[in-house]
Image: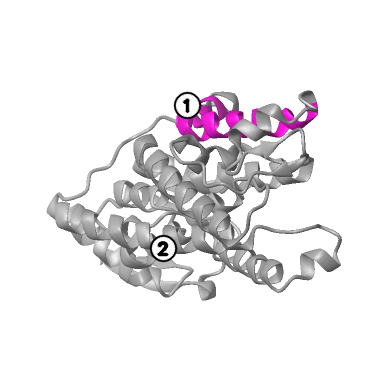
Amino acid sequence: MPVVAINWAGGRICLPGMTMTEYYIALRLPLDENLADFSALLWQQGVAHHIAEEGGSQILRVGDEEQVAVVAELYQKLRSGELHITRHSVAAPQPVQSRSLRQRPAVAVLLLLSILGALLPVVDSSFRAVSSLSFYPLDLGAGKIVADWPVGQWWRLLTPMFLHFGLLHIAFNGLWLWELGGMIEQRQGSVTLLAIVILIAAASNMAQAMMSVSLFGGMSGVIYGLLGYIIVWNRLRPAESLPLVKGVAVVMLVWLVVCMAGFTRLLGLGEIANTAHLSGLIMGVLLGIGASFLRRKSV
């Protein structure tokens, strides 16, 4: 994520290195109106913008045509008192990183459990610990998977998401969890994120288990669920959108298609739990719709 330097001049905010032709006019306001608070709100919402004085007015421009309506809605809510600005003092780089960690406790716990899950096959070559956490238990004596539905062992709906097999597996999933999960946790809270993760994990793991009796694991189904949730939330609640870069969604969805088409086997990456990915994405979309509806009812 790029770091943007903000220059203050006469109560207005200017962004260096950006041309006016790259933007769409979202608001035209009087010169005597102080837009510092509104600009801070836009940055909190992840809306990049540029405010300049032209023709006796203040012109607020955005880089995405779809954000014009978002800016107008936020401005009206701020003027009517529906939204309030939380001010934060500027801190040095190290404290900023520390605050970021404190703002993502749920993500930190999920990452820690995933790292521990990735270490299990390394430190326990007998696979007893893995067998206790996988969806289907393992018959360690016969060296095969027990194809019995694990009735009464409810934790097996969730624990496969912590199992990772290989450094790249945990590295990529960890990075996406930090990015997407942290995005949700910082804006909507730890409880919301954990509820979303639990529901997506249960749905994606069960779907994968119903598709095939195999040893599978990883946070990928949850990651795609978080992606689906964010995409739908941003579409239905643009005034409260999460700062997802459009290119990220495109890359992840293209990779999903590549995996489902079987190209990963040709690349020597082995079998992929495509059912978990797809069902996780669908569950995330459904949760995004539900959360948006509940949010609309509460406003």
- Give the residues drawn in magenta, as a range: 96-122
Per the model, the C-alpha gap separating discs 2 and 1 is 28 Å
**Looking at the picture, how far across and down is residue 284, in whole percent?**
43, 58
Q: Residue at x 48, y 72 (%)?
A: 23
Q: Earlier in the sequence, mark 2 or mark 1?
A: 1
Q: Residue at x 41, y 67 (%)?
A: 61
Q: Residue at x 38, y 32 (%)?
A: 88
Are there few (<14), some (14-19), or many (20+) residues within 10 Å of tag 2? many
Where disc 1 sits, the SS reads helix
**Looking at the picture, how far across and down is residue 71, in whole percent?**
32, 64
Q: Tell me if residue 262 can be seen.
A: yes
Q: Tell me: residue 295, above or below residue 274.
A: above
The dot on residue 45 is none
Between 230 and 125, the residue placed more toward the observer is: 125
Q: Tell me: residue 59, above or below residue 86.
A: below
Check disc 1 and give the amino acid type: Arg
Check disc 2 and give the amino acid type: Val
Describe residue 185's horizontal placement relative to residue 164 as left or right.
left
Describe residue 42's horizontal placement relative to residue 63 as left or right.
left
**Looking at the picture, how far across and down is residue 267, in whole percent?**
85, 64
Q: Is residue 112 magenta?
A: yes
Magenta span dominant secondary structure: helix
Residue receiving disc 1? 102
